Amino acid sequence: MIALQSLIERSARLNPRGVATTYKGNDVTWADTERRVASLASGLQHLGLLESDRIGILSLNCATYYEALFAIPWAGCCVVPLNTRWAVPENHYAIGDSATRAVLFDDAFTAQIEELRSALTCLEFLIYIGEGSCPDWAIDAEAIIDDHSPCAPSKRGGDEMAGIFYTGGTTGFPKGVMQSHSAIWASGMGSLPMFGMTRESRYLHVAPMFHMADFAGGMGATLTAAQNVVLQGFDPAAVMATVATEKITHTLLVPAMIKMLLDHPDIAAADFSSMEKIIYGASPMPAATLQRCMELWPHIGMVQAYGQTELAPVATMLSPEDHRRGGQILKSAGRPTPINDIRVLNDDGNDCAVGVSGEVVVRGPHTMLGYWNKPEETERALQNGWVYTGDAGIFDDEGYLYIVDRLKDMVVTGGENVFTTEVENALISHAAVQDVSVIGIPHEEWGEAVHAIVILRPNHTAIEEELIAHCRTNIAGYKIPKGFTFRTEPMPLSGAGKVLKTELRKPFWEGRDRQVN
């Protein structure tokens, strides 16, 4: 039976003296990582946390974050990675919805956790993983590790839930995607041939570790007992320096990060000679950015990964060979990984012909268990083992998948999913707003930008800055509209009375061959 905690045991057994994590100049071997993971798990159990209890992590990237991702299942519990970009109300919802009993946090989120601990009765244990002084109301993780002997790993695994990974919700509330041990392992195994990692690889964690995309990269390093080099967050100068000094071979970047790297004035002189693969995904790559990247680093194999949290997360991949082939193929999302099956279905549930658009559905051992406490949404998204992605796509005659539109009411900006209902709910609560529709419009750096089309109430006024400030108290900064259009005529409606967002998007997407970026 596959269990996440067994992967740490395996790496420690196969490569005990190899470096497991490097963070701020501190190397920890796989043998020591196993000991720390097992001791932290022992401490969690001694606190009174029980099997299948939920334990959250709200922290910037660090080596202890990586350890906690495995210590929590080692203790028999379920991990709940919390979005570091969310506002307090959003994390309040996720913790309360999942009945999370403990949260590991760092210095960046001390204030948020202090606010949440008094507002949530389910939250019993606050565990500090920062680098400063532990607050007097929290428990120091290093003290837990030092004070507890390693315990035996939990026997939970296989199809049992390993974690809840929150994503945006079409109803205005985040959805908790339940993923099993087997699903996370299977996605990692399906990606590994294309990632091409070995024991000698050095994977750079620079995308946020709460995000399933970075989890996929980290799984590759874990499965091969390679080295995890961790940066707290993305900074172009820090990435360039780390790649050079640590001889990084693999990393995962969202397209916006790649563009910021390419735009840095020192990028031409940066030493990327060690880099073998750059995996990119979470949002489509602008053609011009990809071309610049391939011209600057012709020796680096570019790998595109398409998927979603519900698929743990990888569904298709576009290989380095495909990238070198160039042409139309670069607009595709690649081919299915070895572990899954993908179909494109019409409205009647039948397979579309080659070149005909329909909904992309995916089946395999990496599909989610469902949405936490959301049986109706689970029933819609998970049918007979197939995950209905909400993306519209076509297959070509070589089996490459092209994503042409988005059926879900969602914007993907800088690699983050924004369900427009969340933003609309925040805006409509403003006293001056009568009606609002939120759409995604093209953005050179972020792929798409959140844009609000607003109708104000008669005899009311509101300016953009006022609406932005109103949103900021309710939703994360990346969800706040970057632009507004004020209109006086009613929104265009379908015969069923639904807003025709395709009509609202048209002026912004004219001349493009697909309606998502």
Image (cartoon, rainbow, N blue to C red):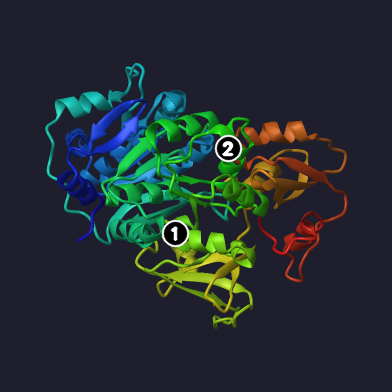
Q: Amino acid at mark 2?
A: Leu
Kindly identify the residue that appears in the image at 49 percent across and 29 percent down.
238
Does residue 451 appear in the picture of this structure?
yes
Report crowding for label 2: few under 14, some 14 to 19, many 20 or more residues within 10 A (C-alpha): some
**Which x, y percent locates residue 50?**
21, 44
- Mark carried by residue 417: none
The quadrant the N terminus occupies is bottom left
Left of 508 or right of it: where is 93? left
Q: Amino acid at mark 1?
A: Val
Kindly identify the residue that appears in the image at 39 percent across and 64 percent down.
367
In the image, 87 versus 427, the foreground residue is 87
Q: Which residue is mark 1?
A: 314
Q: Which of the two marks, 2 or 1, is nearer to us in this view?
A: 2
- Res 259 quadrant in image: top right
- Res 375 quadrant in image: bottom left
Kindly identify the residue that appears in the image at 84 percent across and 36 percent down.
461
Q: Which residue is mark 2?
A: 261
**Which x, y percent locates residue 118?**
41, 28
**Which x, y percent locates residue 69?**
31, 42
- Res 152 quadrant in image: top left
**Which x, y percent locates residue 347?**
60, 78
- Helix, strand or loop for disc 2: helix
Report crowding for label 1: few under 14, some 14 to 19, many 20 or more residues within 10 A (C-alpha): many
Real-space Cα distance between discs 2 and 1?
Answer: 24 Å
Does residue 406 appear in the picture of this structure?
no
Q: Earlier in the sequence, mark 2 or mark 1?
A: 2
**394 relative to 493, above or below:** below
